[in-house]
Image (tube, grey):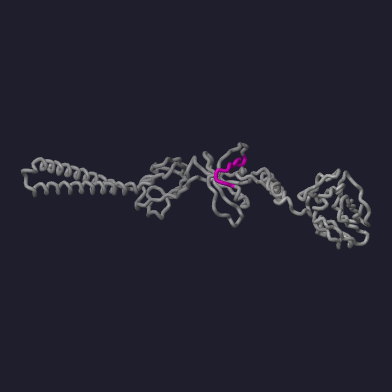
Amino acid sequence: MNKILLFLLSAAVALYAQDRIYASFDVAPAKDAQLALKAVGIVKIVNVEIGSAVKRGDVLLELENESEKLAVKLAQNDLESAQTAKAHAKSVLDKFKLVQSVSSKQAFENAEFDFKNAALAENRAHLALNLAQKRLEDTRLLAPFSGTISGKSIEVGEGVGGVAQKLMSIFSYPDVKLKLSFDEKFKDRVKIGSEFIYKLDGQSEERRGKISLIYPTIDTKNGKIYAEVRARNLTPGLFGEGYIVSSAQDGDATSDKNTAEPKNKDENKTFGLKFEGLKNGGHAASGAKFDDKKASFLNLGAQAKSEINLNSNSACCVKFDPAAKNANLMSVSNLSHKQGDINLNAEFGSAQILLAAKRQTFFAKRDGLANLTQKPVLAKVRNV
């Protein structure tokens, strides 16, 4: 078990290094519903079993509904009668319009009134028919979407008591989704549309999909975030693993490069900097680089010597002896302090800085580089 955990951990680290985020997943239906009926009655027909494939609108079961069917027929008859009455009223009104100039005003208004009542009666008949048809439809359980019947808790002859009673369950198919889980530390790197490359457990075929949904909360029990990927023709309940190709590049190395250079190149360089181009009497600007492990102090030019700020007594782990410690080593060229056998002449034109290890012995030159990792001390500054 420990070997498996170590393997998974190493795989996750490797994927992260490649800007890939490890994620496991379970296959779940894109839609899943518990079905019920609003009507109350006795089950007359059940058309499906568990595992049956259905299409949207298919009748799954039907209650005894003879009374509802009769109500529909009566409503249809009433509608036909209302339509006939309306047609007759319209014919009478049209005739009165032809003789309106020679007929009484009262007779014309009565014909107009009868036509309006006939139109309202027709509209009521339409509404009554729609209501009767709706009640008949309520006795039938229809598939809300295409899928597979995953559960059934009702049989022919049993009673149905309303919407509180769940009769069947259905899940969508072939449309499914992958429910991904990944570490919450990657929440800012996973975006909608990020590619997910995965394999089902026990299969070698590589599949691809796009992140379609990211859950807005973190699971406090395991520190995971969940996301969804749409898929097709996969059986719900399968599982697997893969990696998300992050849409946001890591950028750590680039960030280090961008921040390695100081914003102000005129800053004093007392630690962690590297001096280059100082050989053979070369000059270095105050923004020269200094490496804390390798530095060349041979043949420093006058300009570099006058601009280097040595106001720290512990710059880059270099210690000054007691006499040098009291010297005024400021960045200005006024270096006239002299104590003991140390002569800091103001011209300081071609001073040779000697670094020594223990007991102030001279160090051996190696390719013009001085090793500062052994904490050498500044032994002498000679006046030439």
Q: Residue 100: x and y, percent?
A: 9, 43
- What residue lies at 41% left-to-right and 55% top-to-bottom? 164
The foreground one among 382 and 151 is: 382
* Residue 255 image point, x, y percent: 68, 48
- Is residue 4 in view? no
The reply to whether residue 100 is visible in this rendering is yes
**Nearer the observer, 175 or 122:** 122
Left-right relation of 240 to 134: right
- Determine whether, in the image, residue 307 is placed left or right of residue 141: right
Q: Taking 65 as reference, is 224 left or right?
A: right
Please determine whether, in this image, residue 204 is positioned above or below residue 140.
Answer: above
Residue located at (58% from left, 39% from top) = 208
The part of the image, by quadrant, that contains residue 238 is: top right
Q: Residue furthest top?
A: 205
From the top left corner, tell me how far across and down residue 174 is, in percent.
49, 40
The answer to whether residue 370 is magenta is: no
**Residue 24 vs residue 351: left or right?**
left
- Extreme residue in the left direction: 102
Instruction: Tell me the magenta residue range.
Output: 190-202
Observer-nearest residue: 277 or 165?
277
Give 279 or 31, whichever is nearer the viewer: 279
Looking at the image, residue 326 lies above or below residue 57: below
Percent of width and height locating residue 225: 58, 51
Number of residue marks: 0
Residue 198 belongs to the span the image colors magenta: yes
